[in-house]
Image: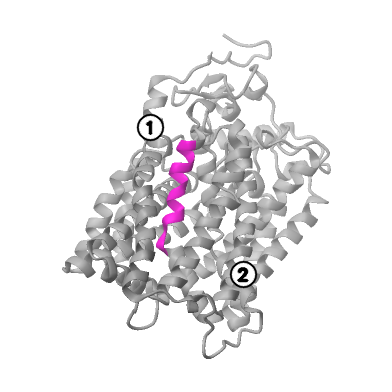
C-alpha cells in the first residue's frame, strides 16, 4: 500500500513491542532514541547517577590540590567548581532529556557525522581510562588487606564488574547503586569519626598551607578551579544518563540530581573529607590515590575494604556502562560493526583488564590531561549551541540527528572544536606550568568564541541535508507513534525514523540507517537533487 505521494504506507503502532522491550533490557536503546515509555522516574534516575558521587577520586583530588595551594584556596576553587559543574550539568541534563539524544547523537547534529564519530570515540576512551583507574583502586585495597598478586585482584575486579552492567540504567544500575549507597554514606562518615577517635581531631587541616609556596603565577583558588576543569567529562556523562529522564521531570532532575546540590556533596564535601583524612591519618610517602586508599584500609581494616569496594563499584557501574555504549556507537558508525552492547561490555572488560596490567598511573593522568582540554572544547561548543537554540526559540526536540538528514561535516561546529582543542593541546605541550593552568580556560574561550561567530554566518545546509518524505510529519505525535523499520522489522518512535530512498522510501530506523551504506549514499544523492539554494539560517535548526 502506498500513500498519495507514491511512497509505502508506514505501519504505525502506539506501544512498544515485546521484542523491542526484551532488547532494551540489555541494550538500553543505546543506538536509538529512548521512548517516553522507557524513561526512568526521578528516584530511579538519581540512584543510577549518584554512583558518581562515591568515587574516591573526589576524595583524593581535593587533598592533593590542598598540598599545593592550601586548604582555604582549595575549598574556594572547589566551591566555584561546584557552581559551574552544577550549572553546566543542569543545562546538559535538561537538553538531553528533552531531545532524547546521547552525546554521539547530539554531536552529529552540531559537528556532522564525522565529528559525532570522533566524539563517541573520545568519550568512550576517556571513560575507559576512568574505569581502569577506579577499578585499580579496588584491586589495591583488596591486595593490601588480603595479599596475593595484583594481577589476580585486577582479574577479580573485572570479573565481577562486567555482569553488573549487562543490563541498563532503568533495569539494574539504579538498583545496584541504590543498594550500595548506604554502605558508602555510612562508611565515609565512619571513616571520619574513626580517624578523629584514633588520631585525635585538630582544626589545623582547615588552615593548612604548604611550607614552600608553589610558584604558580595565579591565585591558588584559580589553580584549584582549573584542576577540576580537567574533569568536565562529567558533562558528557550527565548527557548520556540524563536522557533516560522523563521530559516532565527535566527541570527537577536538572536542578537537583544533576545540579548544584549534587555537586555540593560530590565535589565540596568529598574534597573537604579528603583534606581532613590527609591531615589526620598518617600515610607514608607522598599522598596519592594509592596511598590514600591504603591509609583508609589500614585505619578501618575490613570495614575500609568494604567502603572502598562499595564506593568504587558504584562509580564503575557508570564507567563500564558508558564505556560500552560509546565504543558500541563508535564502531557502529565508523566501521558499521553493529554488535550488541553486551558484547561490547565483554570486549571493554578485557581491554580494561589488559591495561590494568601495565603501570597505569604512570601515564594515565597525562593522557587524561590532553583528553580533558578536548572535552572542554566540546563542552564550550555544546553550551554555545544550546544557548543559541534558547535565544532563537528552538526546542530541544527539534534537533536533527538522523544520519540521512545530517551532513558529513558541520564546518562551524567541527572547526571550533578542532581549533580550540589544538590550541589547548599545544599549550599543554609547550606552555609548561602556565600551559597546564591556562590550557583548559583558554580552550573554552576559543571554542565558544569561534562557534558563536560561526553561527552568525551559518547556513542551513551546515546542519541539515534537506530531503522529502519525513516520517515525523506523517504521524500525529512522533514521540508516541511507532513506525516499523523495513530492515530490522522492529518498530521505533517516529521521531528517529527516516525514509530509505535506496529501498523505495520504505521506513528505516536510526540504528539501521547508520549502518546501511546504500541508504547513506542514496540519501546524499536525494539531498543533492532536492537541495534548496544555500542561505543563512532563518528557521530553527532541526525544524526541517
Quadrant placement of the N terminus: top right
The secondary structure that dominates the magenta segment is helix
Reply above or below: 37 against 211: above
Spot occupied by residue 228 in the image (x, y as percentages of width and height):
56, 66
Spot occupied by residue 285 in the image (x, y as percentages of width and height):
35, 83
Q: Residue at x 63, y 61 (%)?
A: 377
Q: Quadrant of residue 325?
A: top left
Q: Residue at x 65, y 47 (%)?
A: 91
Q: Residue at x 69, y 26 (%)?
A: 468
With 67 as the anchor, is 358 left or right in this view? left
Residue identifier under label 2? 76
Q: Secondary structure at mark 1?
A: helix
Q: Residue at x 80, y 41 (%)?
A: 392
Residue 25 is labelled as: 1
Q: Can residue 353 be seen in this snapshot?
A: yes
Which span of residues is magenta-colored?
43-56
Q: Nearer the viewer, residue 472 or 167?
A: 167
Amino acid at each position: 500500500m502506498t500513500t498519495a505521494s507514491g511512497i509505502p504506507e508506514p505501519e504505525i503502532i502506539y506501544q512498544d513491542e515485546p521484542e523491542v522491550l526484551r532488547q532494551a533490557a540489555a541494550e538500553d536503546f543505546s543506538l536509538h532514541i529512548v521512548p517516553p515509555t522507557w524513561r526512568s522516574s526521578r528516584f530511579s534516575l538519581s540512584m543510577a547517577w549518584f554512583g558518581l558521587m562515591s568515587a574516591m577520586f573526589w576524595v583524593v583530588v581535593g587533598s592533593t590540590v590542598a598540598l599545593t595551594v592550601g586548604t582555604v584556596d582549595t575549598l574556594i576553587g572547589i566551591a566555584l567548581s561546584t557552581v559551574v559543574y552544577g550549572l553546566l550539568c543542569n543545562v546538559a541534563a535538561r537538553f538531553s532529556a528533552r531531545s532524547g539524544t546521547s552525546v554521539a547523537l547530539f554531536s552529529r547534529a552540531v559537528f556532522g557525522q564525522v565529528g559525532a564519530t570522533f566524539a563517541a570515540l573520545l568519550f568512550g576512551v576517556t571513560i575507559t581510562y576512568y574505569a581502569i583507574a577506579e577499578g585499580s583502586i579496588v584491586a589495591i585495597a583488596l591486595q593490601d588487606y588480603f595479599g596475593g598478586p595484583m594481577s589476580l585482584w585486577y582479574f577479580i575486579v573485572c570479573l565481577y564488574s562486567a555482569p553488573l552492567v549487562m543490563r541498563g540504567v532503568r533495569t539494574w544500575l539504579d538498583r545496584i547503586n541504590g543498594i550500595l549507597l548506604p554502605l558508602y554514606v555510612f562508611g565515609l562518615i565512619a571513616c571520619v569519626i574513626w580517624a578523629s577517635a584514633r588520631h585525635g581531631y585538630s582544626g589545623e587541616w582547615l588552615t593548612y598551607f604548604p611550607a614552600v609556596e608553589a610558584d604558580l603565577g595565579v591565585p591558588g583558588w584559580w589553580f584549584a578551579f582549573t584542576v577540576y576543569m580537567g574533569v568536565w567529562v562529567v558533562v558528557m556523562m550527565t548527557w548520556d544518563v540524563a536522557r533516560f529522564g522523563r521530559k516532565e521531570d527535566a527541570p527537577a532532575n536538572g536542578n537537583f540530581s544533576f545540579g548544584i546540590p549534587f555537586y555540593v556533596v560530590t565535589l565540596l564535601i568529598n574534597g573537604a573529607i579528603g583534606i581532613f583524612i590527609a591531615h589526620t591519618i598518617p600515610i607514608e610517602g607522598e599522598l596519592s590515590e594509592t596511598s590514600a586508599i591504603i591509609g583508609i584500609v589500614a585505619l578501618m581494616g575490613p570495614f575500609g575494604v568494604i567502603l572502598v569496594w562499595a564506593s568504587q563499584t558504584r562509580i564503575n557501574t557508570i564507567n563500564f556502562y558508558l564505556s560500552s555504549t560509546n565504543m558500541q556507537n563508535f564502531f557502529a558508525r565508523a566501521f558499521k560493526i553493529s554488535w550488541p552492547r553486551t558484547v561490547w561490555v565483554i570486549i571493554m572488560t578485557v581491554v580494561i583488564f589488559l591495561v590494568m596490567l601495565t603501570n597505569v598511573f604512570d601515564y594515565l593522568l597525562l593522557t587524561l590531561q590532553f583528553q580533558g582540554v578536548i572535552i572542554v572544547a566540546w563542552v564550550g561548543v555544546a553550551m554555545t549551541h544550546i544557548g543559541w537554540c534558547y535565544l532563537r526559540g528552538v526546542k530541544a526536540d527539534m534537533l536533527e540527528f538522523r544520519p540521512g538528514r545530517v551532513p558529513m561535516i558541520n564546518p562551524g561546529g567541527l572547526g571550533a572544536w578542532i581549533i580550540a582543542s589544538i590550541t589547548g593541546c599545544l599549550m599543554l605541550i609547550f606552555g609548561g606550568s602556565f600551559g597546564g593552568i591556562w590550557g583548559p580556560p583558554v580552550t573554552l574561550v576559543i571554542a565558544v568564541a569561534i562557534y558563536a561567530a560561526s553561527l552568525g554566518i551559518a547556513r542551513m545546509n551546515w546542519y541539515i541535508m534537506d530531503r522529502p518524505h519525513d516520517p515525523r510529519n506523517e504521524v500525529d505525535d512522533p514521540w508516541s507513534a511507532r513506525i516499523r523499520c523495513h530492515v530490522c522489522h522492529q518498530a521505533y518512535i517516529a521521531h528517529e525514523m527516516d525514509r530509505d530512498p535506496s529501498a523505495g522510501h520504505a521506513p528505516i530506523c536510526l540504528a539501521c540507517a547508520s549502518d546501511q551504506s546504500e541508504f547513506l549514499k542514496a540519501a546524499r544523492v536525494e539531498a543533492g537533487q532536492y537541495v534548496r539554494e544555500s542561505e543563512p539560517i532563518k528557521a530553527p535548526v532541526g525544524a526541517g
